[in-house]
Amino acid sequence: MSTKKDIIDRCRANIRERLIRPTLTDLNPTVYDDPLEKFISQAQVMGCRVERAKSTDEVDAIIKKVYPDAKIVASSLPYVKSASLNPDTVPDAQALNGVDVGVIRAEFGVAENGSVWVMQKVKERDVCFISENLVAVMPEHVVSNMHEAYGEVSFNDYGYGVFIAGPSKTADIAQVLVMGAQAARSMTLILIPDL
Amino acid sequence: MSTSHSIAAKKFLENQTYATWHDKTFWGVRAKRDKLAFELPEWERLRDKASAIKRHTLTNIDMYLEMFSEAAEKNGVEVHWAKDAQEFNEIVFNILKSHNAKKLVKSKSMLTEECRMNPYLEERGIEVVETDLGERILQLDHQDPSHIVMPATHLSHDDVGEIFERELNTEKGNHDPTYLTYMARLSLRDEFLTADAGMTGANFGIAATGDIVVCTNEGNADMSTSVPKLQIAAIGLEKIIPDYEALSVFVRLLARSATGQPSTVYTSHFRKARPGADKMHIVIVDNGRSQWLGDPQHWESLKCIRCGACMNTCPVYRWSGGYSYSYFIPGPIGINLGMLRNPKEYSGNVSACTLCLSCQCVCPAKVDLGTQIYKWRQALDSYGVANKEKKMMVKGMDMIFDHLSVYNAATACAHFLNGMGPLVNNGLNPWAYAHKMMKFPKKPFHKQFEDMEKNEK
């Protein structure tokens, strides 16, 4: 406790003038005429495969089409009938190692960078990362930029959320871009109008 | 005459093929940054806002630190405070010890480099595994990072291939980056699954909500924290920002400035421990920062968001490499942070600047990096580290410039020096190092000007 006080006191003593916070009212960030279209193209630039579906009934067929060799599918979403593991009921995070396809829900997309907001809704969130391939099922709800996005993010009691923009990447070896560093090696978005 | 940087740079430049590759690689990242920046008409306004938000936050950091720690504690997180590197290392070790943790997986954190945390923990029996691919390569080869965002970019794929052959038993001669990345993935997967604790740094701490925000492309911060039972986050106190509105400005700037991406792949928000996991810990570190706040000339270095753009654009960094700098952070921001840390020890880096100011033109938080380096140079004498020959010559020049008659006599005679090349272009003249002195005209400029005016009349 005393270190905390020392540090904060020392900061206070060294502040000479308190500067006011700027407003963002004159920032005029880029907004897109068709955010959905921009989102889809940007998500593809980030390495996502984008699929459109009319209802959740089609999700299993899309997974089968995109990942025909997948043996283990993990999901807690009730409409993913192909799932043999549920990240909500597995004993621990390690139990999800070896999952071929993890299927999660994303809340909305961001047009400027092709990312989706994922709020943790299952006990073991590593399903988003440890799965070889990640599928995010999401409504056709897209905002233009990160300013709008941070007005929309929500949390629940799990206290974790993440923007994900495509598969895991690295260029740490000689600046050569490689998909699939430590987390998912591919990402597929399934957009459903009334989800 | 030579500084620690110029001596090291000379060595770097011995291999011109490599130096040229190094320059091209980082200039390529700068070009990607430009492409992304110019796609946003509001780019310069974003930089202005980022700077102003940081200036506001830093000059109210006492209040924001209270807010942040209160919010984090409300989330059930245990918040620790470390006044210096030693305290930081002790706190982390004690958390690990109290949970009987033997293996720690961690994502990249310049703060843990600053505190030399890994050797501290390793000496005490903790196995520390870096999980960012670049950091992992360096750890396997016992090297330090040469860049804050692309830590192993000084190595070629053959270098990495040889390290992996030795350390990970990969196929002999297979140096394909995709193959090597996959082999590292398999090896790190085992580490994630068997680690007792996971640690991240923090790109941002959100005062309003207590979030630790970490940006990665590999997903290693998330793997490190979603599998082991114990999570620790380390954050320098200057990384606290007010809220999500402020965060939205910084996340738009960070990846575009760093690597020319519109966003990192993962922008992760950690508020609390996972269900069934142990309590989450956040360690807030001062280690000099609260003092630097009080430096009227240099406090704005604290605005830095560690994107590395100043290095990528810096001609001296590109042509001398990260290891030519004696501070653990290289490039323009490293020169400045090193001087804040210890001006006597790190003054050998301030020469690593042409004052082209490209760094401050690209800095997303508008840190006036080059201007500050200039100011540090002016202060070298007060730390007793000014160059002796230059000091002597400046004293001589003082005499000349302070007395008009001496000055006129000197400029009138200067051209006699032209015939004495070896006398002027020698090792005793610090300005003649690596370039030839000018030829002095027979008639000094002010004389020429006078004549010109006379002729016009």
Image (cartoon, coloured by chain):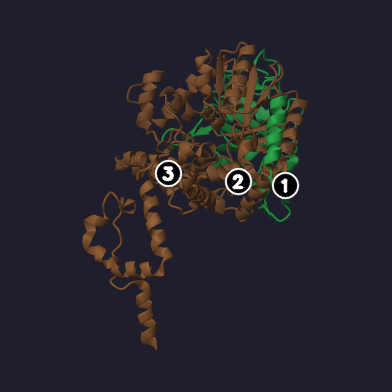
State the image coordinates of residue A186 (x, y, percent, origin top left).
Answer: 55, 31
Q: State the SS at label 1.
A: loop
Left or right: where does residue B428 sit relative to residue B358? left
Q: Chain of mark 1?
A: A
Q: Nearer the viewer, mark 3 or mark 2?
A: 2
Q: Is residue B300 above or below residue B175?
A: below
State the image coordinates of residue B144 (x, y, percent, origin top left).
Answer: 44, 29
Type of the residue with mark 2: Glu
Q: Quadrant of residue A94?
A: top right
Q: Chain of mark 2?
A: B
Per the image, the residue denoted by label 1 is A18
Q: Quadrant of residue A166?
A: top right
As rendered, which of B122 and B166 lies closer to the eye? B122
Type of the residue with mark 1: Arg
As rendered, which of A42 and A170 lies closer to the eye? A170
Distance Cα–Cα, label 3 vs label 2 = 21 Å
Question: In the image, which disc is placed on residue B300?
Answer: 2
Q: Are marks 1 and 2 on the same chain?
A: no
Q: Quadrant of residue B44?
A: bottom right
Type of the residue with mark 3: Tyr
Q: Is residue B383 visible?
A: yes
Image hue for chain A: green
Image hue for chain B: brown
As rendered, which of B120 and B211 lies closer to the eye? B120
State the image coordinates of residue B309 (x, y, percent, origin top left).
Answer: 51, 45
As rendered, which of B118 and A115 lies closer to the eye? B118
Per the image, the residue denoted by label 3 is B317
Q: Are marks 3 and 2 in contact (CB under 8 Å)?
A: no
Q: Is residue A141 visible?
A: no
State the image coordinates of residue B354 (x, y, percent, origin top left).
Answer: 43, 52
Q: Is residue B325 above or below residue B378?
A: above
Q: State the SS at label 3.
A: helix
